[in-house]
């Protein structure tokens, strides 16, 4: 089977055009050309390994947007209903680094749901609600790094693994 290939907008690498890749490419371009982020602000396929029943399950967060070298948004790009992926990316934002990435975003590049990753509250909906680079700088100035309660870590790993089975072990 020969897979269609596309050039990733951020990395310039040739990648398989499967699943939600078209959505991711559109959203990467939107972040740079509409919201004013530099390509260097956006990390692609950030590794995240969760443990479940003593086993490691490697996966990736589609995109992490950094502002002034601090993570601001963990993003999942999807081909289906964005609401179905809210809890997955919320768990991912809480697990991917030592501290919680402040915002978790689920998008299909036409719509988006933005959540406060510490509280789980929805802070915005729609592409207009995605902060541009200058808004992101202001947000980070009033955002302190927050650690995930260690008691909640294993539960978040179970949630992430449960919602993320199609990406795990690829």
Image: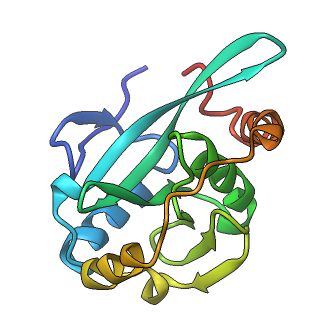
Eyeballing the image, is 2 above or below 33? above
Query: Residue 114 appears in which quarter of the rendering?
Result: bottom right
Eyeballing the image, is 151 above or below 137? above
Q: Which is more toward the observer, 22 or 119?
A: 119
Eyeballing the image, is 28 above or below 115? above
The location of residue 70, given as percent across then percent down, is: 34, 56
Q: Which residue is at a point 80% across and 33% down the rendered structure image?
A: 154
Residue 39 makes an appearance in the image: yes
| Quadrant occupied by the N terminus | top left
Q: Which residue is at a point 75% across and 38% down the rendered structure image?
A: 150
Q: Which residue is at a point 73% across and 68% down the rendered structure image?
A: 120
Residue 21 makes an appearance in the image: no
Of all residues shown, which one is farthest toward the top? Answer: 54
Residue 121 appears left or right of 19: right
| Quadrant occupied by the C terminus | top right
Q: Which residue is at a point 66% across and 15% down the rendered structure image?
A: 56
Of all residues shown, which one is farthest toward the bottom? Answer: 128
Residue 38 appears left or right of 6: left
The location of residue 5, given as percent across then percent down, is: 28, 36
Q: How many marks?
A: 0
Query: Residue 85 appears in which quarter of the rendering?
Result: bottom right
Q: Which is more toward the observer, 27 or 3?
A: 27
Q: Which is more toward the observer, 55 or 80?
A: 55
Q: Which is more toward the observer, 31 or 136?
A: 136
The location of residue 94, given as percent across then percent down, is: 63, 49
The location of residue 87, given as percent across then percent down, is: 74, 56
Residue 153 appears left or right of 33: right
Q: What colouring does the structure picture have? A: rainbow
């Amino acid at each position: 089977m020969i897979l269609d290939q596309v050039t990733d907008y951020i990395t310039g690498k040739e990648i398989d055009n499967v699943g939600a890749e078209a959505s991711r490419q559109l959203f990467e371009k939107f972040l740079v050309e509409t919201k004013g982020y530099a390509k260097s602000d956006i990390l692609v396929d950030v590794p995240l390994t969760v443990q479940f029943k003593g086993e490691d399950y490697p996966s990736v967060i589609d995109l992490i947007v950094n502002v002034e070298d601090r993570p601001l948004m963990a993003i999942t790009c999807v081909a289906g209903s964005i609401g179905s992926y809210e809890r997955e990316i919320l768990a991912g934002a809480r697990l991917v680094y030592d501290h919680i990435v402040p915002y978790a975003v689920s998008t299909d590049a036409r719509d988006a749901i933005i959540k406060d990753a510490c509280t789980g509250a929805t802070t915005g909906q729609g592409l207009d609600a995605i902060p541009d680079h200058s808004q992101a700088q202001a947000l980070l100035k009033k955002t302190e790094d927050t650690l995930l309660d260690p008691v909640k870590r294993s539960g978040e790993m179970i949630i992430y693994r449960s919602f993320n089975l199609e990406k795990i072990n690829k």
